[in-house]
Image (cartoon, rainbow, N blue to C red):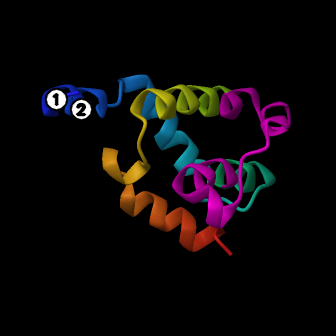
Amino acid sequence: MDKIDKLRRLRLTDSERLALDRLIATTKSDSGQAAKAAKFLLAWWNAEEFGGFDPATLWSVDQEIAQDMLTCLEMIRRLGSYPDAVGYEEEFKGVVSRWGN
């Protein structure tokens, strides 16, 4: 894969960016939904340090959050990289700071 193909692959679609932004926003509350969204995002950031993602979470969160998670899973598969590679390092550091204990 050449450099241009790699840069093209690392671009988020509008729907991917919106889904990721909504999940990050969800983590800023103190709800159970926020904790589950944070665990999902932290598994992408560093699964070894923060643990993996339990797929059963998809039926224990609101439908909109589950859909955002599925959108992000497909995005993660397509990108083949971590959040900092698509410009989300600071946002994920905030999730780590709040939920990474």
Could you tell me which residue is drawn at 32 percent across and 48 percent down? Answer: 85
Could you tell me how many numbered marks the image carries?
2
Label 2: which secondary element: helix
Q: Write down the residue under mark 1.
A: 2
Disc 2 vs disc 1: which is toward the camera? 1
Q: Is residue 41 a member of the stretch shown in magenta?
A: yes
Could you tell me which residue is drawn at 63 percent across and 27 percent down? Answer: 70
Q: In 3D space, how far apart are the residues under numbered discs 2 and 1 (Cα atoms)?
A: 6 Å
Q: Is residue 56 a member of the stretch shown in magenta?
A: yes
- In the shown orientation, is residue 99 left or right of residue 97? right
Q: Residues within 10 Å of mark 2 (few under 14, many from 20)?
A: few
Compared with 75, 94 (above or below) is below
Label 1: which secondary element: loop
Q: Quadrant of residue 46?
A: bottom right
Could you tell me which residue is drawn at 68 percent across and 75 percent down? Answer: 101
Label 2 sits on what residue type? Lys
Q: Write down the residue under mark 2.
A: 6
Question: From which residue to which does the magenta span run?
Answer: 39-66
Query: In this view, which residue lies farthest toward the front?
Result: 1
Could you tell me which residue is drawn at 78 percent across and 33 percent down? Answer: 58
Nearest the eye: 32 or 86:
86
Q: Quadrant of residue 55?
A: top right
- In the shown orientation, is residue 45 left or right of residue 40? left
Query: Which quadrant holds the N terminus?
Result: top left
Magenta stretch: dominant secondary structure: helix
